[in-house]
Amino acid sequence: MRSFLLSIGLLALLSAPTAAQETRVIVPDHPQGVPVSGCFRANQDLFGPYRLTFCLDRRGTYQVRGGGVSCDGRLTWNVSGRDIFVDLQRTSCGRGRAWEAASMECRHVGGLLGAIAGRVLGTPVLSTLRCTYRPTVRGVGPRTFTATRV
């Protein structure tokens, strides 16, 4: 009985994910993947004067600033191959305004800065993402933008 319980405990320990595991995105020249984490800022405004910044970490967050609004929301994300899928939750911006739920698909954009940083640090980094933002608002089409690490 004791060996049975020990076997079950060992199996549970080996199958449990560790906090140190990183989510990785597959990019050319790095078949084991590149760690995905950090914050990125859109290089252009979305839907008028609004600028998006988002953080891909354990507790994903996003911020929208501009046009007299300041919105802070939550997001969830996951990686599949070379793609990063992000779901932004609806959030209140105060004064009767809200930022609507949306989804994004992002992919690493290779660049000289990322390659140099990867060589200096010894680890490749995602420095630029190309994202397609898909709002849930009827009649509003997707927007494609680039976002750089902040």
Image (tube, rainbow, N blue to C red):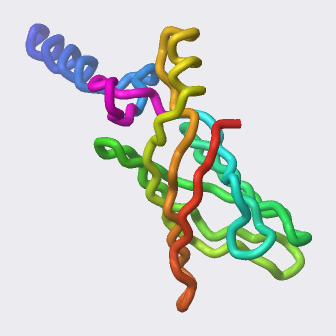
Tally the marks. Answer: 0
Report the front residue among 39 and 124.
Answer: 124
| Residue 123 x/y as whole percent | 48, 15
> Which stretch is magenta?
24-36
Q: Check if residue 14 falls in the magenta segment.
A: no
Q: Is residue 83 above or below residue 149?
A: below
Q: Quadrant of residue 91?
A: bottom right
Q: Quadrant of residue 29?
A: top left
Residue visible at 61% across and 34% down?
Answer: 38
Q: Is residue 89 left or right of residue 150?
A: left
Instruction: Point out the residue furthest to the bottom here.
Output: 139
Quarter of the image for the N terminus: give it. Answer: top left
Residue visible at 22% across and 17% down?
Answer: 9
Report the front residue among 92 and 29.
Answer: 29
Report the front residue among 5 and 71.
Answer: 71
| Residue 30 x/y as whole percent | 33, 24
| Residue 135 x/y as whole percent | 55, 75
Q: Check if residue 31 falls in the magenta segment.
A: yes
